[in-house]
Amino acid sequence: MGRIEESVEIDAPIEAVYRAWTERASLPACMRGGAERGVAAVEVAPLDRIAWSGGEERPGHSGVVTFHRAGADGEDSTRVMLQLDTEPHGLWDHLVEGLGFTDRHVIDELAAFKADVERGGPGLAA
């Protein structure tokens, strides 16, 4: 089983970041905890954390994302911490994970998410 742990600090209030995370359709469902191919949220604590499991269709796949106020007094900044546990199935999945493509994809998705939230992309305005 592979584990990916990444975080990103976003210059936006926690409320806007949490809402953007739960509403952003372009994030893979496996990162949002949304329903796709059996992925289902198993714990939701608004403005704090979302945990999910892959269920029957993606056994061994689970994750949690947590949201933390990170700004000093008067600053609106949020740290998003993501942890994914994946269990590759088949040769292709093992190759992709072994070469680090899964990690790179997560890093790229978090960077794109940060950029979208900070520029107030469509539907992301605080």
Image (cartoon, helix red, strand yellow):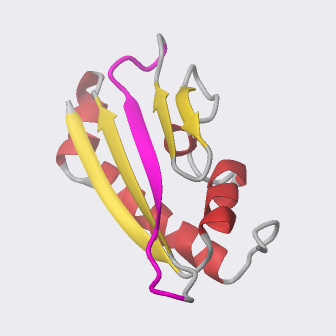
Location of residue 29 by image quarter: top right
Residue in the image at 28% along x and 53% along y: 5
Q: Is residue 14 left or right of residue 89?
A: right
Residue in the image at 65% along x and 54% along y: 26
The reply to whether the magenta stretch includes residue 49 is: no
The mark total stands at 0
Residue in the image at 50% along x and 45% along y: 49
What range is drawn magenta here? 57-73
In the depicted view, which residue is nearer to us: 72 or 7? 72
Q: x%, y% of residue 106?
A: 40, 56
In which quadrant is the N terminus drawn? top left
Residue 110 versus residue 91 in the image, above or below: below
In the depicted view, which residue is nearer to us: 40 or 51? 51
The reply to whether the magenta stretch includes residue 71 is: yes
Residue in the image at 57% along x and 35% along y: 44
Residue 37 versus residue 72 in the image, above or below: above
In the depicted view, which residue is nearer to us: 76 or 121? 76
Q: x%, y% of residue 62?
A: 39, 30
Q: x%, y% of residue 11?
A: 55, 82
Q: Is residue 35 left or right of residue 97?
A: right
Q: Is residue 9 left or right of residue 16?
A: left
Q: x%, y% of residue 70?
A: 44, 74
